[in-house]
Amino acid sequence: DAKTTQPPSMDCAEGRAANLPCNHSTISGNEYVYWYRQIHSQGPQYIIHGLKNNETNEMASLIITEDRKSSTLILPHATLRDTAVYYCIVRVAGGGGSQGNLIFGKGTKLSVKP
Amino acid sequence: KAGVTQTPRYLIKTRGQQVTLSCSPISGHRSVSWYQQTPGQGLQFLFEYFSETQRNKGNFPGRFSGRQFSNSRSEMNVSTLELGDSALYLCASSSRSGGNEKLFFGSGTQLSVL
C-alpha cells in the first residue's frame, strides 16, 4: 500500500499558486519524498524530490515539515497545462544496489481553470 | 537527448496469447523498471533491471517476466494473456540504481486483451 495520503481532487485558478498537500506520517529517516505528475495518456513526469530541506526547481517548490510527516508541492503560477494527476511518493529505499520501486497512491487530480 | 522510448504504442491481443513489449532507456541510463497501470489498481511496480540483472520484483505472477540487454534496452513478456492484463505498461529509466534518483518514464504501451 502507498505510504502517502492525498486529497483526491483540487481546483486552482489559472495564474494562481497551486498548493498540493501530502501526508506521509510513517516516513523513515532515509526515505525521500518524490512528486510526479501524469497528464492524460502520458507517462508520469518527475517534478521534484527532497529529504528534509525545502527544495525548489524550475517547475515547483517542495516544502517538507520539520517532523517530515507531511509536505506541500507548490506550483507558483498554475497554467492550464498543469492540469494532471499529481502523485506524492515516499521512495522505498532499495537494497543490494536496487533503486527501490515507487509505490504510487491514487494521487490528486488538479484541475486548473481559466 | 532522446527520452525513454516504448514500442509498440498500442497492441491488441487475445486471451491465451503472449506479448513482448520493448523499452529503450535514455542514453547512458543503466537502470530500467516496469510498471502496470490500470483504472482499478493504479500504477503498480512490476520489476527493475540494472546491468542486465533483475534487482527488484513486484507482486505479479510468473507469467510476467523481463530481461535487460547489454545495451540497457529492456523487454517484458506476458505469457498466457488474461483479460485482466489489459493495461498501460510503462517503462522508466534512471542513470544509476540507488535510492535517490529521478525516474524518467516513457509514454507506455497500451495493451488490450480481447
Image (cartoon, rainbow, N blue to C red):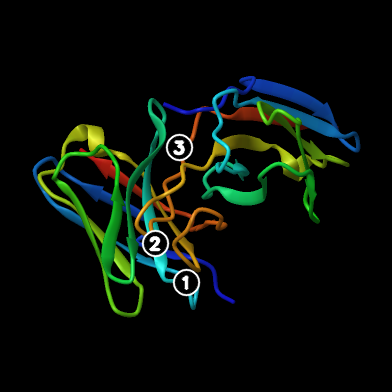
Secondary structure type for disc 1: loop
Q: Chain of mark 3?
A: A
Q: Residues within 10 Å of mark 3 (few under 14, many from 20)?
A: some
Name the disc covering residue B29, or none. 1
The residue lying at 33 percent from left, 71 percent from top is B51
User: Is A22 placed above or below B95 here?
Assistant: above
Mark 2 surroundings: few (<14), some (14-19) or many (≥20) residues within 10 A: many
Quadrant occupied by the N terminus of chain A: top left
The residues tagged by marks 2 and 3 sit, at their Cα atoms, a distance apart of: 16 Å
The amino acid marked with disc number 1 is: His
Q: Chain of mark 2?
A: B
Q: Is residue B79 left or right of residue B107?
A: left
User: From where the camera sits, is residue A113 visible?
Assistant: no
Q: Position of residue B56 (x, y in %)?
A: 31, 51
Q: Which residue is mark 2?
A: B32
In this figure, which residue is indicated by the disc labeled 3? A103
Name the subunit of mark 1: B
> Can residue B96 be seen by looking at this rendering?
yes
Q: Secondary structure at mark 3?
A: loop
**CB contact under 8 Å: marks 2 and 3:** no
Q: Is residue A111 left or right of residue B75?
A: right
- Residue in view at x 90 percent, y 34 percent: A16
Taking A14 as reference, is A55 left or right?
A: left
Asked if marks 1 and 2 touch (Cβ < 8 Å), the reply is yes
Q: Position of residue B66 (x, y in %)?
A: 23, 58
In the image as oriented, which residue stretches furthest toward the front? A29
Q: CA distance from mark 1 to mark 2?
A: 8 Å
* Nearest to the observer: residue A66 or residue B78: A66
Q: Residue at x 60, y 26 (%)?
A: A24
In the displayed structure image, the side of residue A11 where residue B8 appears, left or right:
left
